[in-house]
């Protein structure tokens, strides 16, 4: 039983005329008759009682009519909903982004996206890097924004390279410096994220490559907490330059970091080999467009 057969049946049932049904459906008489014949054979009995003068519904045909009309309405609704999704008149996209990206980069991208596609719902999970990777890998979200992951299961498209900066108390002697080295920074109590944070691992690996060791005095789970602790004078830290605005809001200061400089690519993550929804693909396109003419998201401490 096909939609075309149901359309033919409904047209004849409503007009009680094969000729008028042909006009309504823009079908030839043989094509309409064949559609009705095939439907009757599929169902196992006659739907119409036909004479040379009259067409009438059989009891079975009368029972089928309201259900056929409902099925056709449902079919049309499904077609329209999918058409709207493909044309971004409706839809839903899920995104995971590390907080520094969600707070500093996403707002202007989402503002423009929503202006163009106001009926597309957007869900953003602002979570740490490790959760971004996990949510994209497991399919809980379609697109992730974060540092380049150390896995082959995800496709990564670089948007820019973020350089890490020193975070120091506002009243520290280091706060007035243009540049601070790791050796100078590590003379103070160091605050960082707990393991297995990928940022913690990046810092440790960067120092180890230079024969240095990260000596940790305090550790926690959130960069926002680190900003507050540094502002309170508990120690110093290192963060992505993306966090500069929030570090300043907490009352701490960002200073260019050197010897060694630490940087990491930031970009889009998707599951390798999986097709994106139209809404998610449009998010990727909006992000690419935003970074097409620049390699930096905002003016930063290392500019």
Image: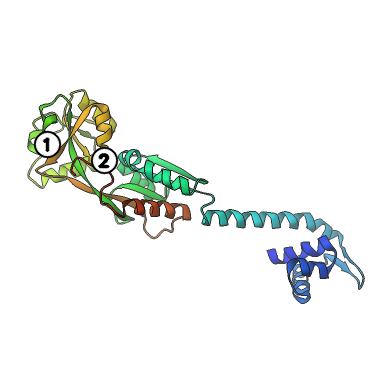
In this orientation, does residue 224 appear? yes
Distance between mark 2 and mark 1 Cα atoms = 18 Å
Q: Which quarter of the figure is the N terminus placed in?
A: bottom right
Which mark identifies residue 147? none
Say above or below: 146 vs 252.
Answer: below
Percent position of residue 265, x then y: 24, 50
Work out whether residue 195 or residue 125 is closer to the camera in this orientation and state it: 125
Say above or below: 81 vs 46.
Answer: above
Percent position of residue 82, x then y: 57, 56
Answer left or right for 182 relative to 27.
left
Instruction: Label 2: state its secondary structure.
Output: helix
The residue drawn where x is 21% and y is 23% is 232
Which mark identifies residue 178? 1
Q: Give the farthest residue toward the bottom.
A: 30
Label 1: few (<14), some (14–19) or many (≥20) C-alpha neighbours in 10 Å = few
Give the mark, 2 or 1, whose residue is nearer the N terminus.
1
Choose top left, top right, bottom left or bottom right for residue 242.
top left
The residue drawn where x is 27% and y is 29% is 249
Answer left or right for 301 relative to 287.
left
Label 2: few (<14), some (14–19) or many (≥20) C-alpha neighbours in 10 Å = many
Q: Of tags 2 and 1, which is closer to the observer?
A: 1
């Amino acid at each position: 039983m096909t939609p075309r057969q149901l359309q033919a049946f409904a047209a004849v049932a409503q007009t009680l005329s094969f000729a008028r049904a042909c006009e309504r459906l823009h079908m030839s008489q043989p094509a309409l008759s064949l559609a009705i014949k095939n439907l009757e054979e599929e169902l196992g009995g006659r739907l119409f009682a036909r004479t040379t003068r009259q067409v009438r519904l059989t009891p079975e045909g009368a029972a089928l009519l309201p259900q056929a009309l409902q099925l056709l309405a449902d079919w049309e609704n499904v077609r329209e909903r999918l058409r709207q999704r493909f044309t971004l008149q409706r839809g839903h996209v899920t995104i995971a982004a590390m907080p520094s990206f969600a707070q500093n980069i996403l707002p202007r991208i989402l503002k423009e996206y929503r202006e163009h596609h106001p009926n597309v719902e957007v869900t953003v999970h602002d979570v740490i890097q490790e959760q971004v990777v996990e949510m994209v890998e497991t399919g809980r979200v379609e697109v992730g924004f974060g540092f380049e992951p150390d896995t082959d299961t995800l496709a990564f498209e670089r948007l820019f390279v973020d350089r890490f900066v020193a975070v120091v108390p506002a009243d520290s002697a280091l706060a007035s410096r243009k540049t601070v080295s790791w050796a100078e920074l590590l003379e103070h109590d160091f605050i960082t994220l707990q393991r297995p944070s990928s940022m913690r691992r990046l810092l440790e690996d960067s120092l180890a490559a230079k024969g240095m060791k990260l000596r940790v005095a305090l550790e926690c789970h959130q960069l926002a907490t680190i900003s507050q602790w540094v502002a309170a004078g508990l120690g110093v830290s290192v963060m992505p330059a993306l966090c500069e605005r929030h570090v300043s809001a907490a009352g701490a200061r960002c200073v260019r970091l050197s010897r060694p400089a630490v940087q990491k690519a930031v970009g889009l993550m998707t599951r390798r080999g999986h097709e994106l929804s139209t809404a998610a693909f449009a998010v990727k396109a909006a992000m690419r467009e935003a970074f097409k003419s620049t390699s930096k998201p905002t003016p930063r401490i290392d500019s």
